[in-house]
Amino acid sequence: MTRVHGLQQPVQAALDASAFWRTLAAQWPLLGSPVRPCAEDVRIVEEMLATGTELFGTAAHKRAWLLGVTPEIAAARWLQDIDLLALERVGAMIDSVWPGDTDSRRAICADWLHAPFPDESFDLVIGDGCLTPVGFPDELSRLLTSVYRCLRRDGYLMLRLFCRPDVAETPDAVIAALHSGAIGSFHAFKWRLAMALQGMVDAPDVAVDAVWQVWNAARIDARALAEARGWLPAQVGTIDVYRGSPARNNFMRFDAAIGHLRRAGFDLVATRIGSYELAERCPHVLLKKRQGGSEASAA
């Protein structure tokens, strides 16, 4: 049996959070779906954006705020009259990942939770998996409050969520699926294992160090695994950035995620799900800002 200790205890980390993200930035070329958006994710985003005037109205100057510097989103086919501003807390992510400023897009280094924007500055806020790495529930609440404040009347929020399944897997089952060849990518394995660990104890989040600890305890020969599955050894090695890191991820169930968004003042408009491995756990959602405010403020 897989033994997991201290999932809800603070991690005595060898790396601070910024170091974790700096290393992740350097690893970006090694990451793949579902951790990183694939071509199908980009197509779904572009199809949602293609509704253009219907979504954003007829305002002459339209602005979008990108949470993070996800290059696949930044380089998507945007409407010509939309200016994109990306906000990223870790400068190394901008240096390593951002595809570059243009006349219609730029990136700045600042914290999502303290967005340096006036109220109602944007027609759209967009992000890929951005609810997962924020602290739950306090930072999540602050992020959604920040987004709500910065969206104009009738503005939209477009997200790809990372959601654990309603029926939790066990870590042992995920390891067994890896051994049997039932998992198609190492990145899908990492996400499944992390979701299984969180779901096993129904915790609010999961330490990435705990994911590495279970991987390490399984005594899997990483090089042999990579050779057998046709993966790059360096891709398998991306799990080592989890070791000793203070970073934590929260993988809410879909209904819980929508509930948090609704309470923050956003109503679900549309949901799209791709066909790639684990896509059912990575739904794209489009939400509209509710004019009455959050349910908490309305109460």
Image (tube, grey):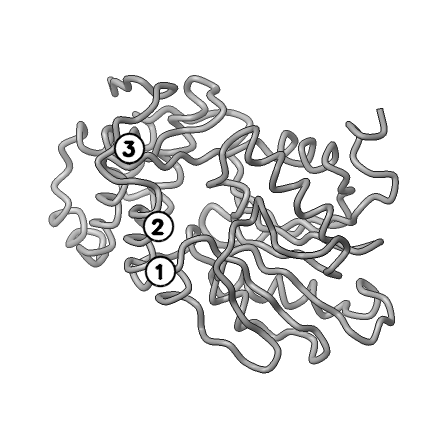
Q: Which mark is residue 108?
A: none
Residue 120 spot, x, y in % from top left: 77, 55
User: What's under tag 3, amino acid-wise?
Assistant: Asp
Q: Mark 1 sits on what residue? A: 92
Which of 188 and 25 lies nearest the eye of the viewer? Answer: 25
- First in sequence, mark 2 or 3: give its number: 2
What's the distance in space between the residues labelled 2 and 3, CA to CA?
Answer: 14 Å
Q: Answer whether labels 1 and 3 touch (C-beta < 8 Å).
A: no
Where, quadrant-wise, is the N terminus in this rendering? top left
Q: Which mark is residue 209?
A: 3
User: What's under tag 2, amino acid-wise?
Assistant: Trp
Residue 107 spot, x, y in % from top left: 52, 67
Task: Tell me the quarter of the picture where residue 177 sits.
Answer: top left
Which of 258 and 126 lies nearest the eye of the viewer? Answer: 126
User: What's under tag 1, amino acid-wise?
Assistant: Ala
What's the distance in space between the residues labelled 1 and 3, CA to CA?
Answer: 21 Å
- First in sequence, mark 1 or 3: give its number: 1
Give the secondary structure at mark 2.
helix
Q: Residue at x 17, y 51 (%)?
A: 228
